[in-house]
Amino acid sequence: MRRSLIIIKKGSRKGVAFPHIRRQSRQKSVLTNRFAVVLINPSPELKMLPRMTLGLQQIAAYKRDGFLVIENFVSTTACDGLRARAEEVVREFNPSLISIFSTHEQTRTSDDYFLESGDKIRFFFEENAFNSNRMLRQSKEQSINKIGHALHDLDPVFDRFSRTKEIEQLVRELGIEDPLLLQSMYIFKQPRIGGEVTCHQDATFIYTEPLRMVGLWFALEDATIENGCLWAIPGGHKLGLKSRFVRADAGGTRFETFDDSPWAEENLQPLEVKKGSLIVLHPLLPHLSRENKSSQSRHAYTLHIIDPSCEYPASNWLQRSAEMPLRGF
Ligand code: FE2
């Protein structure tokens, strides 16, 4: 008898309720260690078994804590493939347009390059990347903070990584009935220069009414305290939205503050995870990541997924042109 390794495939995809959302041909899913199943000469019907992505305990933990860690959600091969593609994209990038991304000085850096990045692939440098003469201190590869915010729609490798049945099923199980992929970011957190991201809620930057969104944070490398892993305040998502980052009427952006009390940072817990792990983030969860002072990079990829039954305000900083509507899975 011949032995074979089979990855069970799921059934057909569900349709998307919005006619403006372009369907795309289904591309091969990213393989996941978590769902890899070894079978010996399986019958055809076994290949179509449905799978649950989340258990009831995991959903309960997400509701209680505001986050959920799922180990081995994507394979190391998929992580490496995305890293290699990011390297290529950076290699092809000519840094003639520069925008420095820093949550310390969000308003100052919210120039057109940033504000128009919702439907583009754009590059944002670390705040410390430049010397006083505006020259890069080190290679562009080691100086970029992140790439955003439409990698998932404009690059085929990112598209394949972002649109898998596993991700679709997971976000549906978390209550996003007709998921739309709003934004993607590739975050480098390079050794010794990867900057701090101060404590925030993702809903400050992406808001819907009612608030229905899921943030997905994929560890493309081991994330440790040393190289700047995420930290979160468990249960902090129950305390409400503190602020919104919106487009200002006069141009640029501003923060709209509802609650200026300090974060209970003494309650932060580090979320150290292995490469291939997924951290699911509630939009109201307070979280941060510290500087990377180590010699190890901490690459991560993030996706934010919204539900079109909720209103997406025109005041959100992140907008798309009519020519490039949001798409589902
Ligand atoms: Fe965040």
Image (spheres, rainbow, N blue to C red):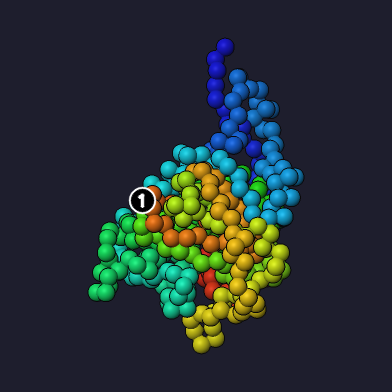
Please tell me which residue is depicted at 54% across the width and 21% down the height of the picture: 4
Is residue 77 shown above or below 319? above
Q: Position of residue 266 (x, y in %)?
A: 60, 63
Q: Which residue is mark 1?
A: 295
Amino acid type of the residue that numbered disc 1 sits on in the rendered structure: Ser
In-front residue for pair 147/235:
235
Is residue 220 shown above or below 317? above
Quadrant location, the N terminus: top right
In-front residue for pair 304/43:
304
Mark count: 1
| Mark 1 surroundings: few (<14), some (14-19) or many (≥20) residues within 10 A | few
Q: Quadrant of residue 49?
A: top right
Q: Position of residue 128 (x, y in %)?
A: 34, 67
Q: Is residue 110 visible?
A: no
Please tell me which residue is depicted at 59% across the width and 37% down the height of the picture: 34
SS type, badge 1:
loop
Please tell me which residue is depicted at 72% across the width and 55% down the height of the picture: 64
Q: Position of residue 235 (x, y in %)?
A: 69, 59
Please tell me which residue is depicted at 39% across the width and 57% down the height of the picture: 293
Query: In the shown orientation, is residue 175 left or right of residue 325?
Result: right
Name the residue at the front extreme: 266
Q: Position of residue 138 (x, y in %)?
A: 27, 60
Q: Is residue 9 visible?
A: yes
Query: In the shown orientation, is residue 318 left or right of residue 123?
Result: right
Is residue 105 shown above or below 231? below
Is residue 38 shown above or below 201? above
In-front residue for pair 119/111:
111
Name the residue at the bottom extreme: 250
Q: Is mark 1 within 8 Å of ligand 1?
A: no
